[in-house]
Amino acid sequence: MPAPPRSVLAAGALALSLLVTGCVAGTSTESAGTPAGDQPFEGEVEFWTINLKKNYSDYITGLITEYRKKHPKVTINWVDVPGQESSTKLLAAVASGDVPDAVNITSIELGRFVPSLEPLDSHFGQADLADYHANLVEPLRADGKLYAIPWYNGGAPVAMYRKSLVGKAGFDEKAPPTDYDQALALADKVYSETKVSGMNSIPDVNVLRYHGVELLSADKKKAAFNTPEAEAVLAKFKKSYDARGIAPGAISKDVRNMPQTLENGQLAFQPTANASQLLNVQKNAPDVYKDLAVTEPVRMSTGGYLLLAQQVFVVPKASKQKKAAAEFIKFFTNGANQLAFCKIVPIYPSTVSSTKDPFFTADGGDDAMATARKVIVKGMPKLEYKPLGTGKDAELGELLLEEVRAFLQGSKSAKEALESAEKQWNDALA
């Protein structure tokens, strides 16, 4: 299967935030298209995206032009916002009452904006939602109301194993680890056999969620993770860390530049990872890339995979063009248009029909990226998007991680680390 064009991509195209980087903000208003008879709505729709204008202007303006040929009474005013300014600009717009109409935000930010958003249930019926993965739509509801429509995401995670290393520890590509217990056992054995650390995963909020540990109380006002179950998770990771199954640099605060990685040859595998990391390995360590076996990743206690975030579209409550905005979102995120976007940037669609295209299903031989696409598409229905939903998710995650680092280095017991993190979470949530 041919690889999609990648020349315009920054190396970190699918970081945790899922924002395409290195772009410049700006605006573009499309002029009138060919008349197509009476339309059910008309007017100007202000349409916001995040960091897309520089590299994907042709794609987006092409869709706008196509849309306006069928809806000439609707003008689309495209505004592209820098990622670091997207939330503050939208907050300012909401405060002023002068809001955009169709807005791209990250799902992580959805909770803070819900009070100012239009429920979309009256605009998106069951037929309109039928092609979107239900497991990506349902988490976008609050109190039973739908507040956002899914667009693209980083896809289901994959696992990556260096065959030349894990093979010495008895790794079977057809039966890879399915949970962290198996991954830790493999990591320890790999180090014992090769003196190369197995992985660099440590028990952060996501690893705890993989183990079924509840992080917050039902009302989201207090930490709930200070439990014997969480202590047990920390203890087994500490055992592997001390045995060098987990790489010593796994406690680094600079998660983008870990001392031990697949790319620099000092790591044997990643039990769960975003497939975009394959691009970095392919570019920076082609020999390692050729050595990789890509498989399904470890699973959560529920049997699913954790989705950290997705890009979505919302309509502000103060919009004067709610219907026109909703109709444009339907068009912009339909299966055909999402598939076209996936072919020019390594992202994954929220629509089922897109993933049935040969681009995702054709046999790519032994190529790691082609294998990853198949693994990801197979795993899409198992994705679970479960944000903390506090508005302080990133801050809370780092507070816990700092205590976990102290525990792994031996300066605190597991109980002390969890108690300290619990107090800090409660203070932050108060």
Image: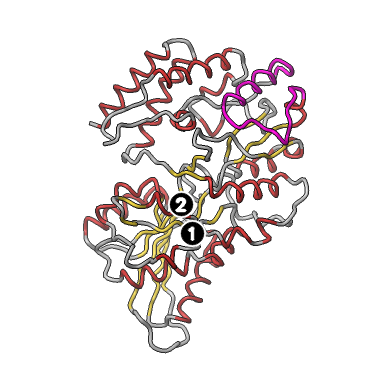
Magenta span main SS: helix
Q: Quadrant location of residue 179?
A: top right
Q: Which mark is residue 242?
A: none
In which quadrant is the N terminus drawn? Answer: bottom right
Q: Which residue: 75% across, 52% down?
A: 364
- What amino acid type should be assigned to the residue bearing mark 2? Leu
Query: What's the colour scheme?
Result: secondary structure
Camera-side residue of 325 and 31: 325
Q: Quadrant location of residue 76?
A: bottom left
The segment highlighted magenta reads 168-195
Circles 1 and 2, Cβ within 8 Å, touching? The answer is: yes
Q: Disc count in the image?
A: 2
Q: From the viewer's perspective, is residue 254 above or below residue 410?
A: below
In the image, residue 152 lies at what x, y percent? 50, 55
Residue 193 within the segment the image draws in magenta: yes
Q: From the viewer's perspective, is residue 399 above or below residue 46?
A: above
Relative horizontal placement of residue 334, taking residue 187 as reference (left or right): left
Q: Which residue: 56% across, 52% down?
A: 347
In which quadrant is the C terminus drawn? Answer: top left
Q: Which residue: 29% across, 52% down?
A: 114
- What amino acid type should be assigned to the residue bearing mark 1? Tyr
Residue 94 within the segment the image draws in magenta: no
In the image, residue 359 lies at what x, y percent? 67, 59
Relative horizontal placement of residue 181, taking residue 32 as reference (left or right): right
Residue tagged 2: 136
In the image, residue 396 lies at what x, y percent? 36, 31
Relative horizontal placement of residue 94, taking residue 16 as reference (left or right): left
In the image, residue 301 lies at what x, y percent? 50, 33
Residue tagged 1: 132
